[in-house]
Amino acid sequence: MEIEFKDYLTLNNIYIWSNLGILPFWLMLAMIPNSKFTQILINSIVLPLILSAAYIHIFYQGIFMQESILNVFTLYLSLDNLYTIFASENFLLLFWIHFLALNLFLGTWVARDSVKYQVISIIRFISLILIYFTGPLGLVFYWFIRIFYSKKITLHD
């Protein structure tokens, strides 16, 4: 019996490898944000392309597994519709990858900004941990801390 690459692209495998694959990037942001190696890997298009490929694959799988992609727009109509959409493994994983990508983007910004304003490492580390697990909560925590380091409050950067 011949096993093909597509046989490994199950939703569960994509979920596991997405979670494990993103961890080294978070560790680099937390531990060595100034490193050229970190800057090349984090600021290149490689990671967004990998996450986008997984996203497109899941989206494609959802269309051909008879789950109507158009139904996703009903999630805006009620909380029950949101619950129904998330009951589908395809859409649940689609949104999880969305969450991972956006949180990594936030983490990358915080890491660069903390270097710019010379925020101490422990504050950067706590902010990144909070962003990794809670996204916006970690960003708000960092913004409050950043005010003290930048000595200004601005609505844009």
Image (cartoon, rainbow, N blue to C red):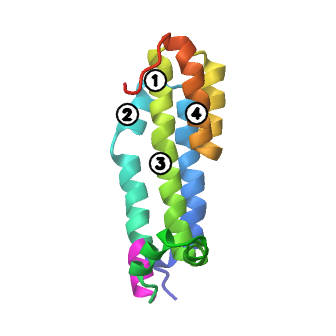
Per the image, label 4 sits on a secondary structure element best described as helix
Residue 113: numbered disc: 1
Name the outermost residue toward the left.
Answer: 45
The answer for how far apart the CA atoms under marks 3 and 2 are is 19 Å
Residue type at numbered disc 4 = Val
Task: Give the residue number, with chain letter if any, for mark 2.
Answer: 40
Position of residue 60 relative to residue 124, above or below, is below
Q: Which quadrant of the view contains residue 109?
A: top left
The answer to whether residue 69 is left or right of residue 137 is left
Q: Which quadrant of the view contains residue 132?
A: top right
Q: Which of pointers 4 and 3 lies earlier in the amino acid sequence?
A: 3
Tell me where residue 72 appears, x and y as whole percent.
45, 75
Q: Which of pointers 1 and 3 lies earlier in the amino acid sequence?
A: 3
Task: Give the residue number, with chain letter if any, for mark 3.
Answer: 102
Residue type at numbered disc 3 = Leu
Per the image, label 1 sits on a secondary structure element best described as helix
The answer for how far apart the CA atoms under marks 1 and 3 are is 16 Å
The answer for how far apart the CA atoms under marks 2 and 1 are is 17 Å
Per the image, label 2 sits on a secondary structure element best described as helix
